Amino acid sequence: MKKEINIGIVGAQFMGRAHSNAWYDVAQFYDLPFKPVMKAACDINPASEKDFSQKLGWLSFETSWETLVHSTDIDIIDICTPNNTHMPIAVAAVQSGKHVICEKPAAMNAGEAMQMMNAADQAGVKNMIGFNYRRLPAIGLAKKIISEGKLGKIYHFNAVYYQDWLVDPDFPWVWRHDVKIGGSGAHGDMNAHTVDLARFLVGEIDSVCGEGKVFIDKRKIPGTDRTGKVTADDSTSFLARFTNGASGNFIATRFATGRKNFLRLEIFGSKGSLIFNLERLNELEYYSRDDQSSEQGFRNILVTENEHPYINKWWPSGHVIGWEHTFIHEIGDFLLAIAGNLKITPDFSDGYKCQLALDAVMESSKSRKWIDIPS
Amino acid sequence: MKKEINIGIVGAQFMGRAHSNAWYDVAQFYDLPFKPVMKAACDINPASEKDFSQKLGWLSFETSWETLVHSTDIDIIDICTPNNTHMPIAVAAVQSGKHVICEKPAAMNAGEAMQMMNAADQAGVKNMIGFNYRRLPAIGLAKKIISEGKLGKIYHFNAVYYQDWLVDPDFPWVWRHDVKIGGSGAHGDMNAHTVDLARFLVGEIDSVCGEGKVFIDKRKIPGTDRTGKVTADDSTSFLARFTNGASGNFIATRFATGRKNFLRLEIFGSKGSLIFNLERLNELEYYSRDDQSSEQGFRNILVTENEHPYINKWWPSGHVIGWEHTFIHEIGDFLLAIAGNLKITPDFSDGYKCQLALDAVMESSKSRKWIDIPS
Amino acid sequence: MKKEINIGIVGAQFMGRAHSNAWYDVAQFYDLPFKPVMKAACDINPASEKDFSQKLGWLSFETSWETLVHSTDIDIIDICTPNNTHMPIAVAAVQSGKHVICEKPAAMNAGEAMQMMNAADQAGVKNMIGFNYRRLPAIGLAKKIISEGKLGKIYHFNAVYYQDWLVDPDFPWVWRHDVKIGGSGAHGDMNAHTVDLARFLVGEIDSVCGEGKVFIDKRKIPGTDRTGKVTADDSTSFLARFTNGASGNFIATRFATGRKNFLRLEIFGSKGSLIFNLERLNELEYYSRDDQSSEQGFRNILVTENEHPYINKWWPSGHVIGWEHTFIHEIGDFLLAIAGNLKITPDFSDGYKCQLALDAVMESSKSRKWIDIPS
Amino acid sequence: MKKEINIGIVGAQFMGRAHSNAWYDVAQFYDLPFKPVMKAACDINPASEKDFSQKLGWLSFETSWETLVHSTDIDIIDICTPNNTHMPIAVAAVQSGKHVICEKPAAMNAGEAMQMMNAADQAGVKNMIGFNYRRLPAIGLAKKIISEGKLGKIYHFNAVYYQDWLVDPDFPWVWRHDVKIGGSGAHGDMNAHTVDLARFLVGEIDSVCGEGKVFIDKRKIPGTDRTGKVTADDSTSFLARFTNGASGNFIATRFATGRKNFLRLEIFGSKGSLIFNLERLNELEYYSRDDQSSEQGFRNILVTENEHPYINKWWPSGHVIGWEHTFIHEIGDFLLAIAGNLKITPDFSDGYKCQLALDAVMESSKSRKWIDIPS
């Protein structure tokens, strides 16, 4: 009989549901030395209990995160709440000796993220930020190709993250529109992902210059006659310099009509290039200058072969996986890291470094000039 | 407390594993009036017990399907065994009062498939053939568009199913190479899917003319010095006439180097057209002659909107799903059909009709001429 | 001062215009030992004179092809007339000592095509059939890759040629709808191209089984109250066996709603594969099993590099060419063959062999069985 | 007999050759009230005479542009020389009463471009800057769609122009690497195109913030042992604000390994979106929020229909055109403007306004902050 490891989750919206599915399924696809138990879910809204306890498999439900993080029968806290609560929950959890997975972005700003990082270091617990796209097979393959030197020196890292759900002027005001709750809008939500991928694949960013935009500055507050002010950015673009000399270009927007979840990376190096698009997440395009000159072209690799990262857990060649599989990889690897006392990334220090870059972009947007990122 | 419904599965290879995942997850994504219980798994190979009982969630394991199908505490039998055993297991199961899901193709030939159909009719149980691609959101959307008359009169249904795992001459001899076990090779495995989709989307096939090919006729038997004779087709192509006048063209091959699981449909009608490709299963291309003439083009619809078939069970817009989700849809719908005593398709009669077409192609391949399909 | 070579063209419709452009431009892009002179154009319709003499650059115009082919000051006859006149014009021209380029298909049937071939052989003149797609850079590259053995043994040659201009029921009756003038419809026009490409890239076809279809059998005759009967096929599909064991599948249709000039080749071999699409004629997709296993994928080669076939006559890398450039390549190569007394293909014997295959398909469509092609 | 109009061209390299082809062909495809005569070509290198006089169709050749622009028998001067000579030649030509087409970018900087604009205004001659991509059918269609309001309010204009010919460190030093001759590198060559398209499709740019990069700062001077310093940018990216509130993002680079001539526009508006890629220049992708919600997707429009801009001059539907056809459209329209005394754009004032934006980006690259563009 395997030893059990007990999980508590905080936050019962979209991310809470996606993580729940992963906790539920992980043991089917990972060989784990212990049995993950979905011990307790927590949300300030008691209406979530129905879904989370009765359908998604959590054994209990409560409305106080403080109670949850101090429970003695919980080993792991998974934080899926709005950004302004990440830091207090994470700090309390690690101080209570829990291992913590926290959704991205790490926090409201680098200061908060640093507190999380320091608290986790001091507590000596495993900690992770939910930059789940690192664990897509195609991104894993990209990392491998780059690490093997096959792109040579990287010249360009161009990333866009396009969604369009705010184009509709009737889309209501929600918490994400309030910079005080979200910290930022498209920027913290979407550029957080691409900045993390940039750091993962290319390296640290040195300086940035960017601009945030609000295209529709008032939206109706549901169930009221009032409108709410939109203070969080609808879109943020920025230029970047990497410490290794590469040139970066980032665009995040929720006003890209027709694009639903289109995160495209274009990475150009002295020996080869890579293209990735999240809407076709099973594919990676790779160009190699080592191919015979008359036969060079972008190869569209279907990243579903047994030898590709993570795929041996799934189905045979050509049987594509979906978006939520990334959470199973994330949680599976986190559990293995706990079991083997292994280093796991992206951890809270990655969350902090990502936040430094995001903060610098916001500062640049105000000062209208380039900003150096503290190293 | 919900009433329980007990499942027994037969066959513990690739399909058994994919179905297990669906049984395990279905209640997370479907609102069901009862609780599915993964009661018993069965395989002639006792070595499968480890995976199926300990990891995939089955409560017990045995090696005799006869025992399983006669158990009084089983409500549903799920058949995932090689093709030559479908008929006996299915007939025994329905005669024992079980509802039955059976993997495709229905059986070794139309005669067997008819026995299954008749036995199920007589027993009055729910029955289904695992043509899971009917339950892809993109195929559901295609069905809707066609049903609404948006393609007009269908002129062409061109289907290819390309894989390449047999191109490697060192790929060993397996049971699928023996026509006596598999009934056929690429034909029964892959054309079964596209013929079913043709029937689902366009209608019945009237006559066919085709040819099966074996490209590599001997393969090494693993663990021996011997080679086995390949008697099942590596590839089968055929032309078809539909009863509604449409022209059909089908190609199934395991020698399409570079294609892993590439099932492409091209459906051309008097008012519009549809293109689908299983390697990009979240997308559907639609061309409409009703669009303004200077702006007509194939629209690439990302079939992940809330209003698209099945997607409201999953994630927000743009968050793509994978191949295995089809099994959850299939099993969820099957459970709802049992609960509500509803008609569910594709059932054994669909399996039989598909088999009639497949058999006619094989007869045509021998006689070198067109064969009419009995109606 | 370069020696002049005098050209006469017969036929002043679409093809006549495209060829005129090529005769006009060829000396800009080919180093030729003589100067091509656009001596005389000919069409039964005198109204064409305006365009052909005054705009397209022909020095004179007449309405009798007999006069033209017997002129003593003409060196080359270019035949762009309807199919039923190819044979008599070509035979008269070669017997009059002219070099001849004739549009495809060669003739109304293999018997006529054989007369052309024999007459040209006897006359010892240069002769060519206008299968211009052989001279696309991407097809030239495909030929090179196959000739070097990079695909290994070819298993599949699957070709479609999709257009949609007959889907409109109001499209009027034209000569192409009359089997007595055109010989066939989509088949002779479109399958002629793909059969020629099949012979060029893979080899001879051994036997075929196919079916022609008329989807709309009556159309209005312009300027009258009458309808004309459509006797030429709207679509023809066929299966083929190549002498080298490859399996062939061909579809030609003018009812592929949304496809304008979509000729797609999919060639699968034991070592690699190629994909080509005429609507993106500057690209060739190539998959190689020699690539490192985890990095295999279809490479999309932009066939615009200096080292690619024909491109060094044009623009720098990435500056794409169009459809009509093939005629310049065809005519340029034909002139060089005359100048150097070199063998040039595809010649009348290629026209004849293509016609044998086309005829066999039509016979098969009647007899409803496979037909062997005489070798 | 049509009146003749006499052309003189200056500059006999790549652009000179492409323009020559257009002058040679234009009367085949445009109905013109006069006959264009290729009177004289000019280049400082007498070795160009062979190609230009003997092959490309110019009646004479000389090495002094001053002589050419003052010839009394020349009506139009076409300037295809390096950027640092545009202004003096153009000013002299217009002052000599010639109509002038000048390759892009207009000049070395806005000051020079203003001189050209003022001189042309004063002379009252027709003048044009060779932003040929405005006359691609797909761009013409994009303009029409935007003008009809189908995109609504534009939120984003994101443009990249990717080439890779400088990635090779052995590519020699050429005049384009010297900022004193070229004015800039990738920026003036490539961003000039995308800034012009931005102005054409979206409107004026208000302010910019950008950065130029030199990735390889020394290259071998051919035929010597020396290396030359690269002072012109290998890549320049910038953010932009449009006066209408749209957000702009531009990247031009010659270090995009694998991309040959990849100019991509992504234009997102409140009602729809457009995507264009120069490597597939016959296509335009259009997304409309007016489509039925469950059927929205990017339509890939093959811009080869008779009703599409410019295409009625060419071939039937689906017969694609190439890059050089833009010059025929440009020159044909220019000739018609002269004939009808019509306004023609893009003219020297467009060249000037484009240059203002380009200059501001270069200033921003030095000052590391946003720069307002003088209006």
Image (cartoon, coloured by chain):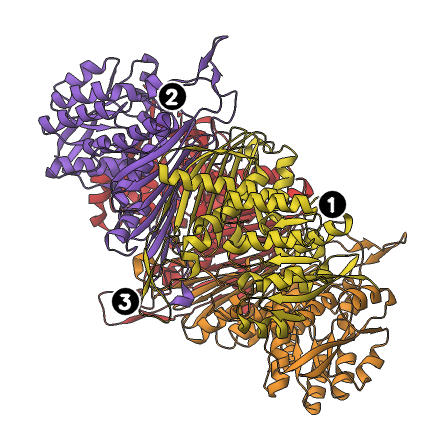
Chain colours: A red, B purple, C yellow, D orange
| Rendering coords of residue A99 (x, y %) | 41, 36
The C terminus of chain D - image quarter: bottom right
Please indicate, yes or no, whether residue A27 appears anywhere in the rendered image: no
Mark 3 chain: A
Instruction: Name the kind of residue labelled 1 in the image.
Output: Leu
Do discs 3 and 1 share a chain?
Answer: no
Instruction: Name the kind of residue labelled 2 in the image.
Output: Arg
Mark 1 chain: C
Instruction: Identify the residue at horizontal 57%, vertical 68% (top origin).
Output: C63
Crowding at dot 1, Cα within 10 Å, few <14 / some 14-19 / many 20+, comes out as few
Looking at the image, residue B183 lies above or below residue A115: above
Closer to viewer: mark 2 or mark 3: 2
When asked about the image quadrant of residue B18, the answer is top left
Instruction: Identify the residue at horizontal 33%, vertical 52% (top origin).
Output: C215
Return the residue found at the far top: B225
Q: Secondary structure at mark 2?
A: helix
Looking at the image, residue B69 lies above or below residue C209: above
Look at mark 3 in the image and give the residue it sits on.
A221
Q: Nearer the viewer, residue C304 or D360?
A: C304
Mark 2 chain: B
The N terminus of chain D - image quarter: bottom right
Instruction: Name the kind of residue labelled 3 in the image.
Output: Ile
Residues under labels 3 and 1: Cα distance? 80 Å
Look at mark 1 in the image and give the residue it sits on.
C342
Look at mark 2 in the image and give the residue it sits on.
B176
In screen coordinates, is D32 left or right of C260?
right
Q: Nearer the viewer, residue A177 or D234?
A: D234
| Rendering coords of residue B343 (x, y %) | 14, 39
Instruction: Identify the residue at horizontal 65%, vertical 58% (top origin).
Output: C77
Q: Secondary structure at mark 1?
A: loop
